[in-house]
Amino acid sequence: MTVQYRLKSFFRKPHNIILFVLVLILSYLTLVPLLTMIIDTVTVHTAEARRLKLPVGTVTLSHWAKVLFDPASVSIFYKPLLNSLITSLGACAIALGFGGTFAWLVTRTNMKYKSLLSSLCIFPYIMPSWTLALAWYNIFKNSVVGGTPGIFTALTGIQAPNWFAYGPFPIALVTGLHYAPFAYIMIGGILRNMDANLEEAAMMLNTPRSRIITKITIPIVIPAVLSTFLLVFSSAMSSFAVPTFLGLPVRYQVLTTQLYRTMNGLNPGQGYSIAMIMILLGVSILAMNQKIIGLRKNYTTVTGKSSNIALVNLKKARTPVSIIVAVFLFSVSLLPLISFALESIILRPGDYSPSNITLQFWIGSAADNTMANSEPGLLLNPTLYRSLWNSIKLSLACSLCAGTVGFLAGYAIVRGRGKKLSDFVNNLAFFPYLMPSMAFSAIYLSMFSIQRGPIPALYGTFAILVLAGTVKYLPFASRSGINAMFQLSKEIEEAGVIMGIGWWKRMTRLVIPIQKSSFISGYLLPFTSCMRELSLFILLVTPANRVLTTLLFYYNEKGWNQYSNGINLLIVLIVILFNFFVNKVSGASIDKGIGG
Amino acid sequence: MPEIVLKNVTKKFGSFVAVDHLNMTISDGDFITLLGPSGCGKTTTLRMIAGLETPTEGEILIDGTVVFSSDKQIDISPSKRNIGFLFQNYALWPHMTVWKNISFGLENLKWSKEQIKERVEELLDMLKIREFAARYPAELSGGQQQRVAIARTLATNPQILLMDEPLSNLDAKLRMEMRTELKRLHKETKATFVYVTHDQLEAMTLATKICLLDKGLLQQYQSPLTIYGKPANLFVADFVGSPTMNFIRCEAKSVDKHTLKLSNQVLCLHFSASSDLTGVTGGPVTLGIRPESVTLSEDGKLKTVVYSSLPSGMETILRLQIGDLLLNSVVFGSLDFPVGSELNISFSGQSVVLFDQEGTFVTTGSLALA
């Protein structure tokens, strides 16, 4: 067989064409940045030239030396690393503790209002990760580190101590609560699908309930727990907004904030080195996760169909437990929104008396708001509308691009399954997940600030935001594409092939309609993630194409509390409304795409 | 007329050879079954005929046209091969009604509305599924889904129908019913049927010719009764027939042109061949005796002990012990025998098979005790 013929028959299959094109594009958009980043860890940048007394572009190991083997390494790298580990581990414990308990209560007991509580529980995960952080800050901030005290002090007169208001404790707590719904979805899924006979068999042998939980239920959900643990851990490690809000007031640095400091400051080389270490951490966490998922398949019983297990009767505790859970969920999902609303309508921060309430930050004219540099009220503010429009435009563009590419990738990866090319594209499409957002955007900034081949210089353009967002959210979209395609037997499509139905028609009339809701979640996830993204865009935006989240960050840095709280409220409402809308229209929901 | 010819067709998945230099001609109007244990390459062969799988080497002709050739670099797409394909899991489109499932392919061929309506109604009647026309696949039972799948496959009037274990998801009773239905359809449509199965009974009852594969290699390609009576080798003999054939290893000594003296620790027999025994003069051989040739007889000289007895009403399957040898036997009629009781047997009929040392078919003949 000639090479020509081989190529011809290779490209006759649509999935091979897609794989081939994706290899080219994704290599350029993910592998080239990675290589650039590796090179950046050993070269001298403009910002460092004077200090290092070396010309720009010289190869040097000084960044690595400074990060790893210098007396200053402790404060540059080791301390932030330790802090990151502490807060991430804490977050995992909290997420698994709350999420797991709630999953058990919902699937295994006769708690009241299950379906209502279950949907309320997903709230913190839909909201941006910093929502709870900002709410915590609003409520517990004290005057010890300067500024005005929060709602808690105003109500009780007690100053929250520093360890409680800022630093590792609230960071871990808030991050953990944000990911608790994720743990609930993962563990709840296993508990729901677990063969109830396993527990019933133990019950027949007169095993006490507590022993059944510790000896049967927990060991069976352990793989799911470990998997959740690793995913929460890596997400917590790369979180930027939460430590910014809750750590910086007391100079508590973690890896991501350190990354922002070094990259935005005088030591980009050190920043890239830190980013490389974070990528390596991410890759090893992912490898561990793959291994655990591989093991999980050994629990053949997990796939068993679930019969109706006798629910644990909470008896007298039923009502109190239900109420406690309801109050708790209410306070983590609705209280933050109330705090934002409240903070956005008080004139002098720290004074919550009715006489201090004003709507001028929402509807006041520029002249009313002299204290905030004559910024017009939010609803009259052209900057806000421009940012809002940018945010929506950007989220739509990213979701369209990432969703479509993700669908195509999922299709091609599943159809070409078992081939090296397919595995390679699969890894390429997932790789951006492991790149810390900040480092990723820094690389894009340097890669596309000059013209490269047919691609013009993109710095300051809307296109670079779309590009970064699309690639960064591709992992979500390709995961749901892959999941959707795995659920669809290939015979469904082959039946069309035999009848001579063309590829386009097979997609639009057979594949997509059947897996509609899974594919829509492939579009939904990038949209919501993009709407609330901060760290990815913070280095890339210019004042002209500012988005809501960076505007929030800008107001926050300026200390215009009412504005930042107001915008936060808007972002959360938009995200929730959009989710609700898509859910009603298509039946797709965010928890479907998580792979639970 | 559609005749399917496979010439030296080979399919490799990496280093694994799924189908190894397969040569086969399927005549027009045949009902062929591809039979073999799982992993023998039968489904791969079917998918290569359909064009869903690309052979590594070889040539496939349908109706005189080369549809695939590795040398001439031809690979015609499935839709242009005038075939229908019936999938094991039916592959009905879950979001379309029964009507739409059948009509979708026709719409794609730009048939007129009236033509489509006429054809769909014809098929609904032919397969007796008219009352389900407005339902979705999920609302149908397995057997009904199967009928819809057949109707959809037949809609475009394919001259060749390829079927991949289409009955394996049905219960035993429905399977019997659908077998009858398929034979009727084969008559009615006058199409060529190629049918994959691992169920030897299904292959025997349906096919005009059976193609038996093992590990990618063609073992035998003949009519069901030939395969049953004159199996090409030990594998075929063992695979076809239930209960399985009895195999007895013996040492042979030539007596004359037609007769061998066979012996082992337990038995001493005379084998009279139905044709000349040119090849075999002596040495180790294997006898193959179908269970129905092991008959109970009062005056039989061979004493056996009942090891197990499985009566099913119409017949009783016996396992009989002679020394350390176990023989399968089928006795017709409503009979049961207590385990441990003694029975006398003899070997009846002309259909005892002689295999040589390599396990290859030599001839058939009759047996008598020496």
Image (cartoon, grey):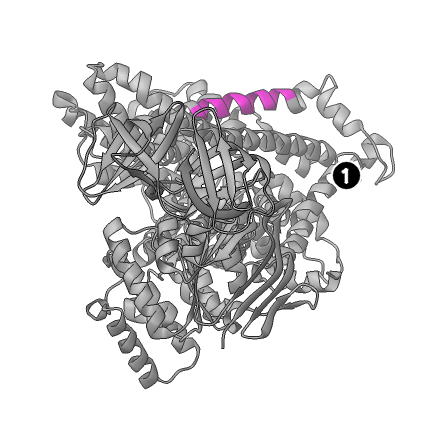
- The vertical placement of B257 against B186, above or below, is above
Residue B36 locus on image (x, y percent):
46, 48
Is residue A89 inside the magenta stretch? yes
Query: Mark 1 is on which residue type?
Result: Ile
The quadrant where residue A443 appears: top right
Quarter of the picture holding the N terminus of chain A: bottom right
- Residue visible at 20% across and 45% down? B314
Q: Which residue is mark 1?
A: A39
Is residue A26 inside the magenta stretch? no
- Magenta-colored span: A78-92
Residue B34 shows in this picture: yes
Q: Which residue is at the front of the view, A536 or B152?
A: B152
- The vertical placement of A382 against A556, above or below, is below
Q: What subunit carries mark 1? A: A
Residue A481 locus on image (x, y percent):
47, 51
The quadrant where residue B178 appears: bottom left
Q: How many marks?
A: 1
Q: Secondary structure at mark 1?
A: helix
Residue B301 locus on image (x, y percent):
33, 31
Say left or right for A94 vs A42.
Answer: left
Residue B53 locus on image (x, y percent):
55, 58
